[in-house]
Amino acid sequence: MKMGRMAARAAIAGCAALTVAGIVPASAATRHTSGTVDITWETMWSGGTLAILNQMVKEFNSTHPGIHVTETNVPSATGDAKLESQIAAGSPPDVFTEWWPVLGEYAANGEIQSMTPYLKGQYAGLSSWMYPIAKAGGTYNNQLYAIPMSMNSWALYYNKSILASAGVKTPPRTLAQLDADSAKEWVIKNGKLIQMGLYPNTDGNGFEFYTSFFGATNCFTGSKYSFASCAAAKKEMSWIASFSKYPYAQVNALESALGEVAGGSDDAFVAGKSGFELSGPWIGALNIPVTNKGMEKNFGVIPFPGTVGGPSTIGQGNYNIIPKGAAHPQQAFQFIAWLAGYHNEKFAASVDPKGGWVPPSASVVNAPAYQSWIRQNPWLKAFFPQMASKYSATPALTSTESQLQLAEPGSTH
């Protein structure tokens, strides 16, 4: 799925890159016995995240002597096109990690394999083990086609000192309070933006990322997304349009100067120049400690104060799929379930915090290592109740799923 979703991956700072970009070192790839099933895993990550993947692959290979995984990185700009060409040629990887809203189309076209046949025996409880939004994000026509290894969860960060300077004593609890508090935070001197409040579309988070807060994630006319005729989407767009009074060009210039537009991990909130930001755990867990340690004690996180009656988030994640023609689908499924943390809670709970990741199941969140991370960073607590909230929603998988992007209203500028 697209960036701002990709902030969760691109922002993973401080991890060492692999010596051979995107590929498990050859020494690790050759240490297995004859009779072992070799499976291939393609991902579109780059940079420090690969160090985390390398650790995961190493752990799996050491604990599953009958299966050996080799991970390869492909450029995100061409990853989907490459996958489709591999499927057409009959030589796809066994596992592919998908970000974009195309899972429904892949399933409808028969380009990926259903995992439902494998949900038996020790895997019979896997579907109910996941958060509902995690399961829904991989289900098409009542068949499970994708399982996430991690999920995104979106909440509202606030800068304590900026709120105090604006005369605001407590973080907002309603959308109206958020708007009023945010308005007090904007500072423009001599025609230059010095400090800003909330602004949808910074960090890449536009219309789509706020839909769950208004009940507008799945607005359809027939089988097509149609936000123009959806009352909840109109309410959301009216709210987003209210930000037109703020100087988009100056916001963009500020963000560009900080490196966010260029793909860096420093945005206005991390730099201490914004009072609010919608984002995920990676901002507080990774970006701030690495980029601006002065912010570490100066922020808090609350559920976004939307209009639906409770905490929510849009369900998104890093979904693993088995392409059509994969040579080893059974072993691929076993690896995918393991990556999610199913019957692997202890290891998943130890590695997910390194990526600032929210697991796809409460069972991993409740594991000791993950709970220890939360105790060390109490602000994380805002991200988890909404994972099981009835108000959270994931974009429905449809045969024309990519139309979700095309149907979205424009950004605030």
Image (spheres, rainbow, N blue to C red):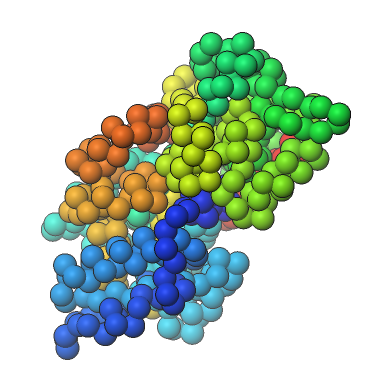
Q: Residue furthest left?
A: 121
Q: Is residue 110 visible?
A: no
Q: Is residue 170 visible?
A: yes
How far across and how far down the image is residue 9, in percent?
48, 54
Question: Is residue 102 positioned above or below 180 on the image?
Answer: below
Which residue is depicted at the point 70% across and 36% down? Answer: 228
Which residue is depicted at the point 25% across and 59% down? Answer: 338
Question: Is residue 36 positioned above or below 283 on the image?
Answer: below
Number of marks in picture: 0
Q: Nearer the viewer, residue 92 or 255?
A: 255
How far across and how far down the image is residue 149, in percent?
35, 54
Q: Residue furthest bottom?
A: 34
How far across and how far down the image is residue 112, in percent?
42, 67
Q: Quadrant of residue 231?
A: top right
Horizontal relation, residue 164 to residue 384: left or right: right
How far across and how far down the image is residue 413, in percent?
78, 38
Which residue is depicted at the point 43% across and 83% down? Answer: 91
Q: Nearer the viewer, residue 94 or 169?
A: 169
Horizontal relation, residue 231 to residue 392: left or right: right
Q: Residue furthest right?
A: 190
Q: Nearer the viewer, residue 140 or 310?
A: 310
Which residue is depicted at the point 60% across and 33% down? Answer: 272
Horizontal relation, residue 136 to residue 245: left or right: left
Q: Nearer the viewer, residue 273 or 340?
A: 273
